[in-house]
Amino acid sequence: MENEKKIEQHRVDQVVAKIKTKLMNKTTELNQAQMERSAVERNYGQNAKINTFEIDDQMETNAEVQQQKQLVAKNLQTEDILDHQVKTLKFLSSSPYFGRIDIHETGEPGPETLYIGNASFADEQNNFLIYDWRAPISSIYYNGTLGQVTYQTPGGKQTAKLLKKRQFRIKQGQIKQMFDTNETVGDQLLQAMLSEHSSEYMQNIVATIQQEQNAIIRDTQHDLLLVQGVAGSGKTSAALQRVAFLLYHSRENLKAEQMVLFSPNRLFSNYISEVLPSLGENNLRQVTLAEFFGKRFEGLKIESLFTSFEHQLVKSDPTLDKLNTFKQTAAFIRQVITYAKNLPADLLQFVPLDLAGRTIISQRQIRQLYQATPTGWPATLRYSETKKKLRRLLRQKIQANVNKDWVTDKMQDLSDEQIRSMTAQLGDDPLIIEQALRRQIVTQSYQPLFEAIYNDYFIDIYKQYSLFLAEQDIMAADAFNQQLEFHRLALADCAPLLMLRDTLTGSGQNHQIKQLFIDEMQDYTPAQLLYLKHAFPSAHFTLLGDSEQALYTTAKSAKKVLHELKKDLHFKKAQLVELNKSYRSSQEITLFIREMLPAGQNIQPFSRHGERPEWLITSHDNWKSDLLKQIQSLKTEFTSIAIITQTAQAAEKLQAQLRAQLKTTVLKSDNYKLPDGIIILPVYLAKGLEFDAVIVFNVSESEYPESRRSILYTACSRAMHSLKLLSIDTPAKLIEQVNSATFKKTLLSNQVLK
């Protein structure tokens, strides 16, 4: 094998030399393109300063400016392409590839050796030295074992015989590890990757994609792909590789701007932000659910998932709780749609169109315009026709105001430069110029009303929703109105309120988005998912979740989730992929956390060993000193240490209690990146993240009763190498129920359990 390694290293040296030569050439081209673009921009700036007082000069200058704009755009496009090529070549020069397959395709005279890497690379004779991991033939590396294999090509299925599969770890152009395997992706390579410490950013997994993850990544047949994966199964990583694959597979008709990812929080968005650029792709749009709703309710503070979670921990009115639970269902959304479609004209909550304290079009006029539309038309069509009539009526009012005295007064306030700007290309006829000026003045004055019509501000959708809620329960309407007075909106009201607006107005849909991803989908209600399906009607959905980590909703089986989604969201072709193997945590941690779950035996640990989790039981008097000792011990071995609490308030309190002895950072929902040092964070912010060592704080019976099993499971599953649970005084019975062979129990204080 040592001789084989020398031969492979010689090939690496040759390939890297060719990559560096091409990198040097492309860097020169990029520098040249940047210089050309700068020259064009300087020329553009000079042309823009040409005198535009004379009509001939102005027309000539406009033509030149447009030409310069096109040149700038063309140069920027060339620069972007070259910049992308340079970045790709830089990466390949350090780690050109990670896999090799020797295959003999059916009908070919002899075998062929292919090397698989992050991107394709060909020499000057167009011989492929590296194949992109997303190429059809590369699927053999991920799915095939030695012997006869099949792979999908644009022309259909192709068969081949896989003769050899070799895996590499290459850094700085040097082979660090190399071995042959008959597995889809060998455990040896995976163990090496997973043994590393956690980092600030998620890494791409192209070298270690597992067969079940590859099925997610390369799926192009289904409009709903539901991925139910246990904690640490790589579902988010697979989804991001899926984005890169889809952009490669559908390069001609799919761009990164046509994809959107709903992530659990901003911190997570930043954590995954390096994956796609490392694969040579632009990042897709990322948004949290609260941000998505916030953009549609400007001026209102939208309750976040986290605030909603903390509210659930506090007991409130049972009647309101029951209705809030109903608001989260697909049935409630359907009820909203039915209400909107059958709403009589006299119950529509129109509001007058006012300008500078004067009513220009009254509420009564708007209602009459709506009532004049055919009653047999659907609500959206009647509403659309009413908008057209309102714009027509405004234009009539503009004409009626053109010769009014207030317009004359505004004309006299105009400077010569303003007049020239407003009347360019109108000739010299003073009457034509005056009428044009008057019309422009009135049109500009009425512009806010045109915008109000465009934005549907002539109907009070909040009052309409309040009336709908009153039909369900007057207390619910009162609670909604009270929130509105303080410019707040509960998360449970966002989806039904938007659906009411859209059903009445025919607005709110985005047909440009082709692929939509939702991470931690188990925390989304059926109502929210139904609205997102309505808002993005052209999108294929990839939903990622783990029902056992449901902090805000009730845990359900994967098959039940799929059945409900197909029924409520009307997908034509749906597919469920279950990921049961956990790669994040050591085998000992995985064996412990699976014991917490009723169906935990489905979770398969990866064979990477470490210490058993430790259950530390301390007293109310000694917990602080015991906790500090544990942290100091962990700091000698790990760089990434997290203390996970149940709520934000508990995190803040703990930081204050430790401040005199230990510097810590509390993570908040508006944080964008993971700081260095000891981190304290509430469990809902830990979702999707991973740490070398985790201490779950205050695992007492009062904090973690049976009903909070999913919360404790979520907190524990963040640990990669070390997990400790600290119980103060009365320990949680949940841990007592876990198989004692899977953890180490340590009594830190003699005062405990007396």
Image (spheres, rainbow, N blue to C red):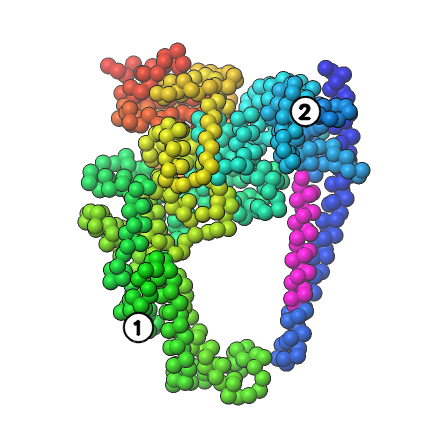
Provide the residue span drawn in magenta.
65-88
> Which residue is drawn at the image coordinates 38% and 25% (left, top)?
713
Residue 359 disc label? 1
Residue 648 position (above or below residue 481): above
Q: Toward which corner of the image does residue 245 lie, by quadrant?
A: top right
In the rendered image, the vertical position of residue 503 relative to residue 603, given as above or below: below
Task: Tell which of 466 and 578 is nearer to you.
Answer: 578
Q: Position of residue 726 (x, y in %)?
A: 35, 22
* Residue 658 visible in image: no
User: Against 385, is 632 above or below?
Assistant: above
Cα gap from disc 2 to disc 1, whole angstroms: 77 Å
**N-terminal of the two: label 2 or label 1?**
2
Kind of residue at badge 2: Ala
- The residue at 35%/50% (across/down) is 499
- Tell which of 141 and 666 is nearer to you: 141
Q: Are marks 2 and 1 in contact (CB under 8 Å)?
A: no
Magenta-highlighted stretch: main secondary structure? helix
**In the displayed structure image, the side of residue 248 where residue 472 appears, left or right:** left
391 vs 637: above or below? below
Tell me, yes or no, whether the highlighted magenta stretch contains residue 91: no
Which secondary structure lies at badge 2? strand
Tell which of 276 and 425 is nearer to you: 425
What is the number of the mark on residue 160? 2
Q: Residue furthest top?
A: 741
Q: The residue under label 1 is which amino acid type?
A: Thr
Query: How many dots with numbers?
Result: 2
In the displayed image of the protein, which residue is found farthest to the bottom? Answer: 430
Q: Describe residue 292's horizontal placement relative to residue 330 as left or right.
A: right
Residue count near mark 1 (Cα–Cα under 10 Å), binned few <14, some 14–19, many ≥20: few
